[in-house]
Structure formats: C-alpha cells, structure tokens
Amino acid sequence: MRLQSLTDAAGLLRRSDRDRVSAVMDRISGRFPQIFVAVYTGSLGEMANLRQFGFWLLNRAAFEDVPADKPNEAGILLVIDAESKAAGITFGYLLDPFIEESDTFDCLSRAHAYWLEGRHADGIVKALDHLALVLKKRSRQGRRDPERFERKVRPPVRPSELVKRLRDGHRKADTAEVVTHDDSERPSQPRT
Amino acid sequence: MNVPRIVIATVLGLGVLSAARQEPPLPVWDPEERSALEESGWVPGAILLNPEPLPDVPDAEVAEPVPPGLENPTDAELAVDESPPAPVPEEFIGDYFAARPESFLVDPQGLLGSEPYAERLGFLNYHADDSSIDFFIYVFGGDQEIPSDVRGEETIERFFSEGVPAAIVFYFLGAPERSIFYLSPSLTDVVAAPEQRRALQSSMMQAFSRTDPIDEFVAFSVQMSIRIYWMERMLSGDAVGEPPADGAAADLAAPVDGPAADQASAKPPGPLAEFVALVALPAALVLSALVTLAGLGFWLKVRARYRFPDFEVEPRLGGPHAAGIGAVISFASAASPPASQRDQVPDYLRRL
C-alpha cells in the first residue's frame, strides 16, 4: 500500500496546515536521522479499531516520500479517525525499547484540547513537538545506559532451555561432589 | 674581615670620583701639524679648539631682533581710554537680573548678533547636556558697567541656590579682562577660590589670543567650559592631574574651521563619555560575548542529531515492522479528559 507520510484522507488539514505539519515532521526526521514520522487522517468506520489499524498500516504501508534507508521499523505513525474522533500512535521495532505507551499518551494528551476545538493541525504540531522532546530524552538515556533498554527487548529464556540449564547445573554439581568424595576417601584407604 | 675591604673600596672610589671631577685638558695642536693644515686651507676643529678668546660683542648688537613685519604700537594704540564706562541701559536691567535666566546665554541687548548668539547658545546647551554643572553667560557691552545697586553675589545666590549647580560669567564683549566669574552657592564651598581664579584667568588668556570680540567670546566660553569640566571631575573625586595647560587647552578649544569645528573640538569628555568608558563599553563587550555564546549554543542545538542504539527486537504479533502499539485517545467529548483515559485496557482484554 503506497501513500505519503502525511496523508489527509479525512480532509482535516488546509494547505497551510499541511505545510506546518510537514515542517514539524521534517524537523523530527532531521534531528533524529534514524526515524521518520507519518500522519494519517481518515474515517475508519464504526467497526474499525484504531490500534489494529495503526498496527496494520505501519506494517503494510510503503511511504513514498521516506528515504529507503529508513524502514518502517523506524517509523512513528499518528492516526486520527475523524469519524470516531480518536487518535493513536504506533511505532516500529527500532523505538520499541525506548518508547512507552505512557509516552505516546502524553503526546496525545497535549493535542487533546486542540482536537476538541477542531484545530487538528495545532494538535498534531503540539503532539509531535512533545514527541520530539520524548525522543531526545530517550536518545540521551539510551546512549548513557544502553543495557537498560536492551534488557527490555531481550528475548525471554524458553522453559526448555531453562530446564536444560538446570539439569546441566545439577550434573556438574554431581560430578564435582563425586570427585570431592573420592578425594576425601583416598587418604583413609588402608595400605596393603 | 670585610672592614678593610670596605675601607679600601671607599678610598679607591673616592679617588676615582675626584679624578673624574678634574676636567681633562683640551687637546693641543702640534705647531708643525697646525701650520701644515693651515697651508692646506682647513684646520679640523678650528672653531672649537680656538685658543683665542671671543671678541667682546656690544650689548646693542646682541639685543633681540625685532621680527620682520611687526611694528611698534602707535600712540593711538597706547592711549588709554579715560572715558568712564556707561551703565547698562535701564530697560535691560530687568531682563538681566529680574529672574533666573531661562537660557544659558543672556544677551537682551543683542550684542552678539543673531548668528553668533544661536551658535553660542547651542554650545552652552551642549555643555549642559554633557555636564552636571550648567554654564550661564551674561553678555554686556565692553564699555558698560553693571549698576551699583545690582550686587552680583546676591543675584547669584538668589537665583542659583536651587537646581542644577551652575557657573555664571558676566562677560563684557570686547573686554574679556573685565569678566566676572561666579559659582552657585552649592559649588562655592567645594571649589577653591584659587581654582576659580585660575579658570577665569585661563579663559581670559584664551580670549586675548583673538582679535575679534566675537572670537574672543568664543574662545573664552570654550576654555571656561573645559575648566568647568575639570572642576566637575575634581568634585566627583576622580584622580585627575592638573587641568590642561593653556596651550593644550587652546589646542583643544581652538576653532579650526568655523563654529562647527569649534564645537566639535571643544567637546569635553563629560559624564556620558565616562559612563561609556567605564560601564557601557565593558557591558557591551560582556553582552556581545553572551550573545555570541547564546548564538553558538543555539546553533549547536539546531545542529544536534540524536541517534538511538539499534537493538535486535524479536517480531511480535506477526508484524514485520512494528508491534509497538501506543496509546489511543478520544477527543469526542470534553467530558472525557485525557486524565480519565490514562488507564487504557487493551481491546483484547475487554469483555465482548
């Protein structure tokens, strides 16, 4: 599915609004060379689920105006459903260790008052500005203590491997015990 | 012991000094060599080493020669005007002495003429802007006399006791030697009388260096302005040296090319200049340094790039690129603010 990183399918943004939003998106892309931001507005219908739609769109979309060296793993997608009046943020695997759900909620909260008044562009700009602050903070933290973030995404140990390790440990312990026992008994053996 | 050495060194030093005090004899020509040189026509050092005494020169011949083009003064010039000075006309007395003058230049008789008056008034206004001591000049005719019932000290005390400290000069046009200098009561005690006298004499000397009465007046006022500036500096407690000598002051105050150049050259470095030198210039330097630093900081901030460590994340939920599903917020109603939506329950945990 091909689309632009700023797709106003719902027609919420005027030309000047689009320019402002594009400028903020470009600024984030410039300051964070690894990532990009996409904004999609549309009417998803009553049955649509905003989380599922964001998840689906970020995994399936091919953003035409995003450089090829920035895969969707590095994307942050802001979806606004004009019909249900809801908005959500989805982000790729690159940012998985660094962004919490509470961070995205804070970004959306900044825009809530503007969106209530129908000032969609202002809300988007506010949300993205706060997102930039969060990204900046997380980037610094990530450089200072990468271990902390890596731990969050390290794959969990499978039960079978855990059992195997336990068994290996027991075997080693048994062997060590036998050796120790032999060593202790050796001096007490009667000489012939 | 060191004592004998000191004694010996002292004796030797005294001997050397006494020998140095004796002038060595002048060299003397050998008669044969001298005669040989005289035959050749030139004797080196003949003037300096001439043993013959200088002939006596009569005093009349060594008298200072009269510079060419300068003639002796005529009898008319040497004649002293014996006529008594006329009093200031009665109709102008009120204009002079009825109230504190509103202008720094008081010339109700119009003795200066309109153009010099305006030019000098501008100069005095400039002085007032740049100095904490105002400078008032009352202009009278050179042959006029202030009526005896007008007492200068009382007049000054009455009009200048309050307000900005002031220096007042009664100037007689064409007769600068008759000028009278007053200071307002707040200054009389702090500026010594000799200093006041020197200021007046210095200004008179500057006036005497001109021939035209207006030029005299200009030179006088400029020099007095400079002296007032030095008084001001002394009062402010600055460690100042002697006020510039008359020659230096003349260089500073001398009109070069008309009134404009005169005013430009006569600008004393007043409080504003001191403020600029002491406070404004360092402050401007500090401010510019801060602005530069702020600009540098802003430039670095704009140029800053932030990167994230790239960790390998195991794909989840079958998503090849993303499974980081963030928050969702509803803005359908103002009745449900963000605070009430913070605790979000994933859809798959909701009861159908």
Image (tube, rainbow, N blue to C red):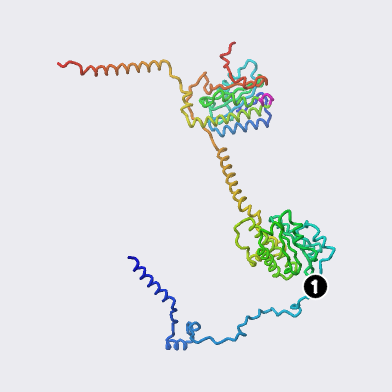
* Image position of B12 (left or right of A2): left
> Dividing the picture into quarters, in which one does residue B64 lie?
bottom right
Residue A115 sits inside the magenta stretch: yes
* Image position of A37 (left or right of A165): right
- When the figure is inspected, residue A122 is found, relative to residue B38, above or below; the finding is above
Kindly identify the amino acid type of the residue bearing the numbered disc 1.
Pro
> Dividing the picture into quarters, in which one does residue B117 lie?
bottom right
Q: Quadrant of the C terminus of chain B?
A: top right
Q: Quadrant of the N terminus of chain B?
A: bottom left
| Residue found at x 79% / y 68% | B145
* Chain ID of residue with mark 1: B
| Residue found at x 48% / y 22% | B314
Magenta part, dominant SS: helix
Residue named by callout 1: B84
- The answer to whether residue B256 is visible is no
- When the figure is inspected, residue B176 is found, relative to residue B129, above or below; the finding is below
> Dividing the picture into quarters, in which one does residue B246 lie?
bottom right
| Residue found at x 65% / y 26% | A8
Where residue B69 appears, as percent x and y from the top left, is 69, 79
- When the figure is inspected, residue A163 is found, relative to residue B294, above or below; the finding is above
* Image position of B220 (left or right of B146): left
Closer to the camera in the image, A118 or A170: A170
Where residue B47 appears, as percent x and y from the top left, is 50, 83
- When the figure is inspected, residue B92 is found, relative to residue B42, above or below; the finding is above
Closer to the camera in the image, B132 or B4: B4
* Image position of B115 (left or right of B255): right
Element carrying mark 1? loop
Residue at the farthest left position: A192
- Residues drawn in magenta: A113-118
- The answer to whether residue A35 is visible is yes
